[in-house]
Image (cartoon, rainbow, N blue to C red):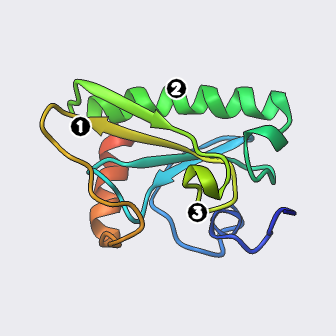
Amino acid sequence: MSYDQGNIFAKIIRNEAPAARVYEDEYSLAFMDVMPQVPGHTLVIPKSAAENIHEIDPEVLSHTVRTTQVVSNAVKQAFDAPGIMIAQLNGSAAGQTVFHLHFHILPRFQGLEFSLHAREMQEMDVLQDHAERIKTFL
């Protein structure tokens, strides 16, 4: 499979699609998942074109993982979460639905189950509110 420049994450990087942005630097971008499994569900993506972890330059990957670390700490604080789950899927057989490398950051609480992913879109004002909460801890 070759990288699709028309995927939604590529469009977000180019500002051709809206996103509740949390953090951005030269290498990576963090924003709220529009179909969150839990409140605070945040995504971190590299700005370079890569479908999965096997196709990315290791230096860009290291910067993206560093962003994931920084943003996950802010998500943990913003949502007062006792745990954080970080997920990264490679290929449709693994459940990947957007073929641009990305990391999911999910605040976790005892007894709080996940919503099904890719089922319901959250209102943009809620996502913007969550993004602002997270930004205060960056």
Q: Quadrant of residue 127?
A: bottom left
The quadrant of the picture occupied by the C terminus is: top left
Give me the disc on residue 97.
Answer: 3
- Mark 3 and mark 1: span between their CA atoms? 26 Å
- Mark 2 and mark 3: span between their CA atoms? 23 Å
The amino acid at mark 2 is Gln
- Residue 20 or 58: which is nearer the viewer? 58
Q: Which residue is drawn at 73% across and 46% down?
A: 52
Observer able to see residue 137: no
In the picture, measured across the screen, residue 8 lies left or right of residue 14, that is left
Choose the circle earlier in sequence order: 3 or 1.
Answer: 1
The quadrant of the picture occupied by the N terminus is: bottom right
Mark in front: 3 vs 1: 3
The amino acid at mark 3 is Thr
Q: Can you say whether 5 is above or below 74 in the image?
A: below
Judging by the rendered image, the residue that carries numbered circle 2 is 69
Judging by the rendered image, the residue that carries numbered circle 1 is 79
**Residue at disc 3, secondary structure:** loop
Q: Residue at x 28, y 28 (%)?
A: 77
